[in-house]
Image (tube, helix red, strand yellow):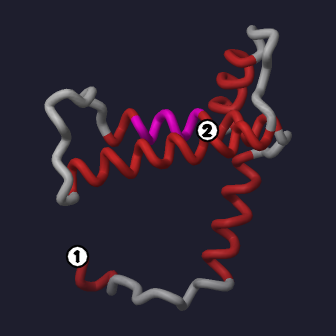
Amino acid sequence: MKDLQLEVDQYISQFKEGYFSPLAMLARLTEELGELAREVNHYYGEKPKKTSETSKTIEEELGDLLFVLICFANSQNIDLQKAHDAVMHKFNTRDKNRWTRINQDNME
């Protein structure tokens, strides 16, 4: 994750404008999430893509969302690896018995 954050920071650092403001970044995240939702709806939902619409993929939209998320984290000096580790700790402690586990014996 550190490598991804560094790569994005090196890319953004070459421009005078730098990172967008937090509110602009949130708007970009929302926009990218909307584009992802649209692609998922085209692929899995009841709304087929118009022939005039640009062909995009869920993978492409997830990549765009990840890029903006990393930009937002970088602009706020947030280490995404630490954030990830903290949320996994929460899932593995507070939520450890929340879901029905797959029986390991059935997987062999």
Instruction: Give the foreground label among 1 and 2.
Output: 2
Q: In the rendered image, which quarter contains the N terminus?
A: top right
User: Which picture quadrant has residue 8?
Assistant: top right
Precedes in sequence: disc 1 or disc 2? 2
- Image vertical order of residue 75 relative to residue 30, above or below: above
Name the amino acid type tagged 2. Arg
Q: Which residue is mark 2?
A: 28
Q: Position of residue 74 (x, y in %)?
A: 77, 35
Q: Are marks 1 and 2 in contact (CB under 8 Å)?
A: no
Which secondary structure dominates the residues rendered in magenta?
A: helix
Query: Which SS class for mark 2?
Result: helix
52, 82: nearer the viewer: 52
* Label 2 CA crowd tier, 10 Å (few <14, some 14–19, many 20+): some
Which residue is located at x 67 percent, y 85 percent? 94
Q: Position of residue 86 (x, y in %)?
A: 73, 64
Q: Is residue 84 left or right of residue 55?
A: right
User: Which picture quadrant has residue 22?
Assistant: top right
In the image, residue 78 lies in the stretch drawn in magenta: no
Q: Is residue 91 left or right of residue 37?
A: right
Q: Which residues are magenta?
A: 61-67
Which residue is located at x 64 percent, y 43 percent? 27
Numbered circle sitting on residue 108 = 1
Numbered circle sitting on residue 13 = none
Distance of label 1 from label 2 (alpha carbons) = 45 Å
Q: In the rendered image, which quarter contains the C terminus?
A: bottom left
- Image vertical order of residue 108 relative to residue 46, above or below: below
Q: Is residue 36 left or right of residue 54?
A: right
47, 58: nearer the viewer: 47
